[in-house]
């Protein structure tokens, strides 16, 4: 089975208040879905339509579930993937998930990787689980690297 991620594109909603980062997903050359992330228009400068990282991460669990039932599941794309993400997924996350979750199969990411420096408003986005590790990391960063008891 081949899953192809189309080139990411931006789309504004009807009332011009929100913007979506979209891509079309194809299974064996037939379009099956359009995936998107939506933000308020003020944040459009932080969306990246140059690479496909966000969409690879979004479809990976679905692909791994379906990979259990086919000989080979390949993910391709019309865009690049960041080299660091591709390395982490192929060397660590995919093998670990496949070993740990009985209904996950192996997925091959067949997308060229590239070391990319982003020019997205010189900003960084992050998520937080709220767990001890992420809370400690934020506290350490905000304190300049020094945590006192």
Image: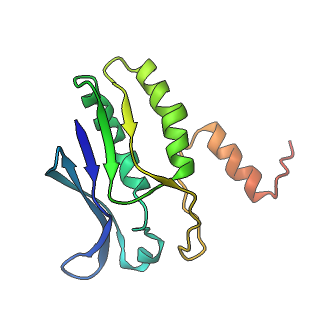
94 is higher (above) or lower (below) than 42:
above
Instruction: Name the side, left or right, on which 7 lies relative to 128.
Output: left
Picture residue at 33% right of the left edge, 24% below the top: 105
Residue 40 location, x and y as percent?
36, 74
Residue 19 location, x and y as percent?
31, 73
Picture residue at 31% right of the left edge, 63% below the top: 7
Marker count (numbered):
0
Picture colour scheme: rainbow
Residue 28 location, x and y as percent?
17, 43
In the image, 28 versus 51, the foreground residue is 28
Please state, as top left, top right, bottom left or bottom right, where the N terminus lies in the image. Answer: top left
The residue furthest bottom is: 16
In the image, 6 versus 59, the foreground residue is 6
Please state, as top left, top right, bottom left or bottom right, where the C terminus lies in the image. Answer: top right
Picture residue at 56% right of the left edge, 74% below the top: 119
Query: In which quadrant of the rendered view does residue 64 lie?
Result: top left
Instruction: Name the side, left or right, on which 62 lies relative to 93.
Output: left
111 is higher (above) or lower (below) than 12:
above
63 is higher (above) or lower (below) than 105:
below
In the image, 60 versus 126, the foreground residue is 60
Residue 112 location, x and y as percent?
45, 52
144 is higher (above) or lower (below) than 121:
above
Picture residue at 36% right of the left edge, 52% below the top: 55
């Amino acid at each position: 089975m081949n899953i192809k991620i189309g080139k990411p594109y931006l789309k504004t909603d009807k009332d011009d208040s929100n913007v979506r980062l979209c891509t079309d997903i194809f299974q064996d050359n037939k379009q099956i879905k359009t995936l998107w992330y939506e933000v308020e228009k003020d944040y459009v400068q932080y969306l990246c339509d140059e690479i496909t990282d966000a969409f690879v991460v979004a479809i990976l669990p679905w692909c791994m579930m379906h990979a259990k039932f086919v000989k080979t599941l390949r993910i391709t794309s019309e865009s690049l993937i960041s080299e660091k993400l591709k390395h982490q997924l192929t060397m660590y996350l995919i093998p670990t998930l496949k070993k740990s979750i009985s209904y996950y199969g192996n997925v091959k990411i067949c997308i060229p990787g590239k070391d990319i420096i982003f020019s997205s408003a010189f900003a960084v986005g992050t998520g937080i689980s709220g767990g001890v590790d992420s809370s400690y990391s934020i506290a350490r960063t905000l304190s300049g690297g020094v945590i006192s008891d």
